Image (cartoon, helix red, strand yellow):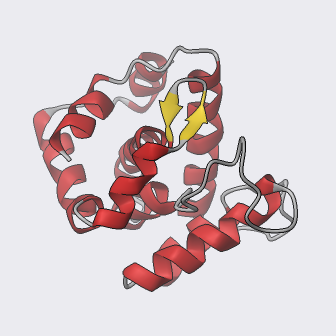
Amino acid sequence: MIEWISSKLNLKANFSFKSEHKECIRDIVQHEMVGMMKNFIQHGETNCLEHSFYVSYISYLVCKNIGLDYRSAARGGLLHDFFLYDWHEEKPYRGLHGLIHPNIALQNANKYFDLNDREKDIILKHMWPLTIRLPKYKETFVVLMADKYCAFMETISLSRCKYVYELRKEF
């Protein structure tokens, strides 16, 4: 599927894209609290950090290709599930995980990072239309679609993005 999307968008996951993507997210992935995301399973056998890397990179590629704010998409995509608990077992907050975790992720992200308005919108509204808040920016739509695509691929164990596994080892 990634190959199909890449071919339709005329994208090549080349060295310069990977290098630029890493620069967009470097300060975030080096933070110890973000590293904790790898302790929580997200979909299938994919942990939350791997999932977020995947969403971040797909969002970066799409936004870069269509002339949107790829930096905000990459950063918001990385922090969209920064909730830091195992949603399969723990219920540290009242309510359904799908509805409340964007607020928790945004609270955590605001605590550790200086976010712009697009990044905040991406984190808060990435579960649309499950949540009723309509995205304000095009980048938010890109990230929420990338999130759904990645979650589907991870759930059926078809996510094979080599770059995500490279990032996992690097950070």
Measured along the vertical axis of the image, is residue 163 above or below residue 20?
above
- Is residue 136 visible from the viewing direction of this image? no
Image side of residue 54 versus residue 163, left or right: right
Measured along the vertical axis of the image, is residue 59 above or below residue 51?
below
Measured along the vertical axis of the image, is residue 21 above or below residue 116?
above
The one nearer the camera, 161 or 111, is: 111
Q: How many marks?
A: 0
The one nearer the camera, 92 or 151, is: 92
Image side of residue 103 versus residue 121, left or right: right
Image side of residue 85 versus residue 69, left or right: right
Measured along the vertical axis of the image, is residue 16 above or below residue 157?
below
- Determine the residue positioned at 73% across, 64% down: 92
The one nearer the camera, 48 or 16, is: 48
- Determine the residue positioned at 50% across, 30% down: 46
- Is residue 141 visible from the viewing direction of this image? yes
- Determine the residue positioned at 56% across, 25% down: 154
**Which of the 4 image quadrants contains residue 136?**
bottom right
**Which of the 4 image quadrants contains residue 148?**
top right
The spot of residue 27 in percent (x, y) is 22, 68
The spot of residue 43 in percent (x, y) is 61, 31
- Determine the residue positioned at 37% across, 80% down: 113
The spot of residue 1 in percent (x, y) is 51, 17
Image side of residue 19 versus residue 38, left or right: left
The spot of residue 132 in percent (x, y) is 87, 66
